[in-house]
Image (cartoon, coloured by chain):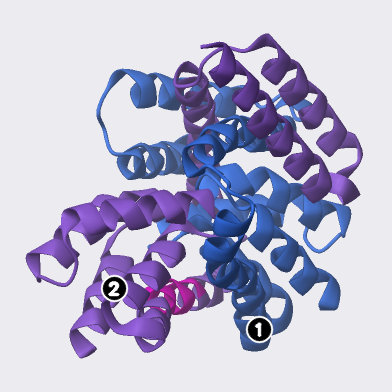
Amino acid sequence: MLNMIFIFFKLGFISFGGGWASLGIIKQQILDNGLLTEKALQEAISISQMTPGPVAVNVATYIGYLKYNFLGAFLNNLFLIIPPILLFFLARYIIHKLKIDKKRVTEALKYGTIILISVTFISVLNPVISEEDILSGIIASLALYLFMKTKLDPIYIILGSAVVGMFIFS
Amino acid sequence: MLKLFFIFFRISALTLGGGYAMVPVMMKNLSSSNLLEKDQFEKILVLAQSLPGPIAFNLAWLSGKQINGLKGAIVSSIAVLTPPFFSIVLISSILKSYSDNLYVSGFIKGAYASLIGMIAGLLIQIIKGTKFKIYNYLVIALAITAIIFYSDFTILIFFLSVLFFYLTNKGSDKNA
């Protein structure tokens, strides 16, 4: 259990740029530690997108609950939020002391987010490529098109694809 | 204080689609109930984005703190975390008994596939939103490769890269 909690603690320090950015790191760390199988992890990620709440919190809860019930879910959440809480207290001091320019931090973090989201993209795409899953590839391309070309809320794209998946994968 | 709790509880329980979907809803609710002005919220948003952590949680903590001190921070944070916690616990206990069902697994597989497309879309949007700097992209490529092969050092690699972006950004400002 310590292994699992530590993953979410580490994640608490680098979860910049929203839930999707952190997904790749979560996925990589969970698989490296052999906590869940690729399939179980994909389930965790999909469910976390479709339920209310921040994605990182949902994944932490889901995995914690799956592995160690209530206690696991609680501890994962707790350790996920300890790093930001620590930094809330330190932030003003650090910014003042080191004369850090907030605008430049935001700019630097944008490039940092590109790293995180690329890692996420590679790690979510990986199973689809290795299984030569053409149907998933088609859904992904359609989702990309809708995401870029329409103003449709992502949650409808996810739910729509899920319904399509219910028919074509069964 | 109770008002603060219910605002964050309701937003968290009713907003689907992750933290960033909650940002505009929070701003609207806090300003319409006269707890936090829009420009105050925007200042908080900048800080929330420059710190790690789930954005919805960071916003709840920081706005709660601004409104009602440390107590406010704790109350809003608990309010924002409770609904997802219990909805996930509920759903995963239901799902445990249906995960072998073909329709359920197809539903999940479809949702997962759509994510791949949208993450690609988000990546394209973010790249379009930043200035193209060749050295930054070399570092990005190196960092991605390093993270994939040396996952133990993910945090270190990430922060070294961000430090590089921060420091080189200074140089380009001087030239301008």
Q: Residue sitting at 31 percent across and 56 percent down? A: B22
Chain B: its colour in the image is purple
Is disc 1 in the same subunit as disc 2? no
- Amino acid found under the numbered disc labelled 2: Phe
Residue A69 marker: 1
Which quadrant of the structure image shows residue B164? top right
Identify the chain drawn in blue: A
Disc 2 packing (10 Å; few <14; some 14–19; many ≥20): many
Answer above or below: position of A155 versus B66.
above
User: What is the quadrant of residue B132 in the picture?
Assistant: top right
From the viewer's perspective, is B19 left or right of A104? left
Classified by dominant secondary structure, the portion drawn in magenta counts as helix
Q: Looking at the picture, tell me which residue is in the foreground, B161 or A71.
A: B161
Where does the magenta region start and end?
A: B80-88
Membership of B83 in magenta stretch: yes
Can you identify the residue that label 2 sits on? Answer: B8
Q: Chain of mark 1?
A: A
